[in-house]
Amino acid sequence: MEKRIYYHDTDAGGVVYYGNYLKFLEESRTEFLEQKGLDITALAQAGFHYAVRKCSIVYKSPARYGDVIICEAQLKKITAAQFIFDQKVYEKNSKRLLVEAEVTLVSLSREFKPIPIPAEIKLKLHK
């Protein structure tokens, strides 16, 4: 996923506010899932919800106003009820690594109780 950094993404120092990377990672995971044929809204309407259970993030280098970044999401592992993603954010022109993250999502019911990931979802993710 490609994204341009705007003024509202930055802090008083002119660099991307650290918390905004979480939004960029979320957007990248959503794009990844949709490219695999999974519609997040349709899944929620069917009673399947996915929430971040754990996030480990390492900030390597700052992005600044006007930069264009590339956000990547790779599915590392699927367990019975969790998706584990390896994610990276790069500055587009220099290919400079900005952020590395491992994000774990848990599959939840409408009542927000952990449930197994349906087989049809796992199948789409393995394509």
Image (cartoon, rainbow, N blue to C red):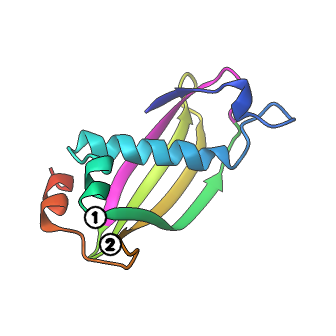
User: Judging from the image, what secondary structure is the residue with disc 2 in?
Assistant: loop
Taking depth in this image into account, of 63 and 51 the one nearest to the observer is 51
**First along the sequence among labels 2 and 1:** 1
Residue 9 vertical placement versus 99 (above, below): above
40 displayed left or right of 65: left
Q: Residues within 10 Å of mark 1 (few under 14, many from 20)?
A: few
In front of the other: 72 or 27? 27
Callout 2 amino acid: Ser
Q: Is residue 7 left or right of residue 69?
A: right
Task: Please name the residue that numbered disc 2 is placed on.
Answer: 109
Distance of label 2 from label 1 (alpha carbons): 6 Å
Q: Which percent across, then down, holds residue 73?
A: 40, 47
Q: Is residue 66 magenta?
A: yes
Query: How many numbered tags mark residues here?
Result: 2
- Tell me what residue is drawn at x 23 percent, y 59 percent: 46
Magenta residues span 63-77
Q: Secondary structure at mark 1?
A: loop
Q: Which mark is residue 2?
A: none
The 10 Å Cα crowd at callout 2, few under 14, some 14 to 19, many 20 or more, is some
* Res. 106 image quadrant: bottom left
- The one nearer the camera, 40 or 68, is 40
The kind of secondary structure the magenta stretch mainly shows is: strand
| Residue 56 position within the rendered picture, expressed as x and y whole percent measured from the top left | 57, 64
Query: Residue 56, relative to residue 4: is it above or below?
Result: below
47 in the magenta segment:
no
Find out whether the residues at labels 2 and 1 contact each other: C-beta distance under 8 Å. yes
Q: Position of residue 124 (x, y in %)?
A: 16, 53
Q: Which residue is mark 1?
A: 47
Residue extending farthest to the right is: 12
- Amino acid, disc 1: Gly
Q: Residue at x 32, y 48 (%)?
A: 41
